[in-house]
Image (cartoon, rainbow, N blue to C red):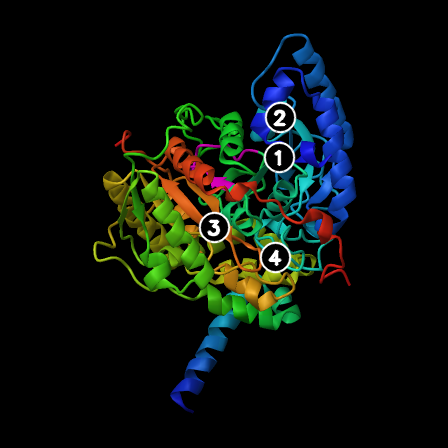
Amino acid sequence: MTELAYLTVAQASRLIRSRELSPVALTEALLDRIAAIDPTYHAFISVTPDIARAEAKAAETEIAGGRWRGPMHGVPYALKDIFDVAGLPTTCHSKLRIGHRATADATVVRRLRDAGAVLLGKLSLHEFANGGPTLELPWPAARNPWNTDLHPGGSSSGCGTAAATGMAPATLGTDTGGSVRNPATCCGVIGMKPTYGAVSRNGVFPLAFSLDHVGPITRTVEDNAILFQAIAGHDPTDPASAPHPHADCLAGLRQGVKGLKIGVIAHFYEEDQEPDPEQATAITAAIAQLAKLGAEVKPVRLSPLARWMDCGRIIHYAEAYAIHERDLQERPQDYAAITRRRMLGGAFIAASEYVKAQQLRTVLCEEYRAVLRDVDALVTLSSFDLPCRIDDDAAIARTYERQCRMPFNVAGGPAISVPTGFSEDGIPLAMQIAGRAFDEATVYRIAHAYCDAAGWTERRPPVAEAVRQPVMAK
Amino acid sequence: MSKDGQAENASAEILQALVEMRGLGRTYARYPDIVTGAFERGRRPIGSFPENFSPLTEPASRFTARTEKSE
């Protein structure tokens, strides 16, 4: 079971295509694994065995008949429970959504169905992708695979946990201020926030429309690129969807970094905020590794991190409040306290401040484009700290400010989180690689070269030993 | 009354007015600390602007991530 559980998308796809592996057998193995270990990790809000078995069987029959749809055909995946799947509830991990049932598939779900992928279920998140882990919600919070007492990152918590523990090789999350990259960072896997407009958000419950992105979380860079390829592309039902086709991210994946210029935004973590020493040491070693692989590495400067964070915070708060205003007025008790606290900030943002934030965004986006005229990609830290305890509310509140992810939501360019090692206590460390708008191919290429050389994605969490009493299971 | 005291009173009055204006009376009555905290966070302004920032800058009101090619 473990061997099948840790097959990558690329490996499973090759075996399925050559009919050495049955999608039905793979799906059954993963359903068994979810049943065995998810009571410890709480990655899933709902498992969809009937859908999974039907889709796996259909894939097997079709492939046996000589029709192979592509690299996701017969490959299992899971979704953050914020994506609509026709006939299923989209809970957003919230009491407010109990009784909801989606009438249509989100565009990305439809694309994965068309690609022949197999839906295993829907994954845990922070309430409405904006709260935090708490006991107040109808479903438990996902756990960190490397230590179940720790926060797995969020808001796409279940995605990081399910991918790292071998419950799902491919997962889809959303990212408004780092919600794909944070769980990837905390769980030691790969999380990509693509370019704004590269992946449709139709059928995805919004948090802040001008910062929201859909992105894959997987165990390898290649798998991430495969999933991105399957979901990207123009969708007229999302007003922000870019009208042009995206570049092939798989063709150049193994070209290495020789000759590429990589700018390091070191001031974010050397001047603007102080990182945990283990995070700092790991990113320094990772940058040295990129140079050793042949990249030309040089420092670059953007506006101070606080300016990016202020801009993102105001846009985020204001746009999120616009969606939740009525419920926060009429049924605030149905939100968890941590969500209420975060959402209500938007009620008090002055219109003038929102306008200034959007004007500032224009300037920051130009700054971002300008720096990427001189280099092919950027590298910086993801989180300043290691994951905190899941029951430490004050430490969790700090995680929203102590990160370098929001600048890429503000600028809209692609940014990926990749592991840079492990702390002395065996907890994952990570950095981000970011790029020009719609140049996911270069970001994936650098991430693949680094991960291939560093080997951190090979390490597995101690799943068998993790079955113990979690700190919040009161 | 000290200057600090006056500022606190003014802030409390602004909070009350905004709570009413936003239809959050019931929420405030039930969760005064959370609403007060949200008020403080929500009123926190942008700390600094770049030198080339101008009040005439076009806001990114319909945000698109442009590419160099499209410029």
Q: Are marks 1 and 2 in contact (CB under 8 Å)?
A: yes
- Give the labeled residue for mark 2: A12
Q: Position of residue A369 (x, y in %)?
A: 28, 41
- Mark nearer the N terminus (4 vs 1): 4
Question: Could you tell me which residue is drawn at 42 percent across and 62 percent down?
Answer: A275
Q: Residues within 10 Å of mark 2 (few under 14, many from 20)?
A: many
Residue type beneath disc 3: Ala
State which tag comes first along the sequence, 4 or 2.
Answer: 2
Instruction: Tell me: A82 left or right of B48.
Output: right
Q: Is residue A196 left or right of residue A51?
A: left
Image spot of residue A205 (x, y percent): 58, 41
Mark found first going from the N terminus, 3 or 4: 4
| SS at mark 1 in the image | loop
Amino acid type shown at disc 2: Ala
Query: For the residues carrying marks 1 and 2, which lies nearer the camera in this image?
Result: 2
Numbered range of the magenta stretch: A191-202
Residue ID for mark 1: A169
Task: Identify the residue position indicated by label 3 in the image.
Answer: A430
Task: Please check whether the numbered discs 1 and 2 fall on a single chain.
Answer: yes
How far, Cα to Cα, is label 1 from label 2?
9 Å
Which residue position holds label 4? A151
> Mark 3 to mark 2: distance in Å?
26 Å
Image point (71%, 44%), residue name: A45
Residue A420 image offset from top left, x and y in percent: 46, 49
Separation of marks 4 and 1 at Cα, in angstroms: 21 Å
SS state under label 2: helix
**Quadrant in which the C terminus of chain A is drawn:** bottom right
Report helix, strand or loop for mark 3.
strand
Q: Is residue A102 visible?
A: no
The reply to whether label 3 and label 1 mark residues of one chain is yes
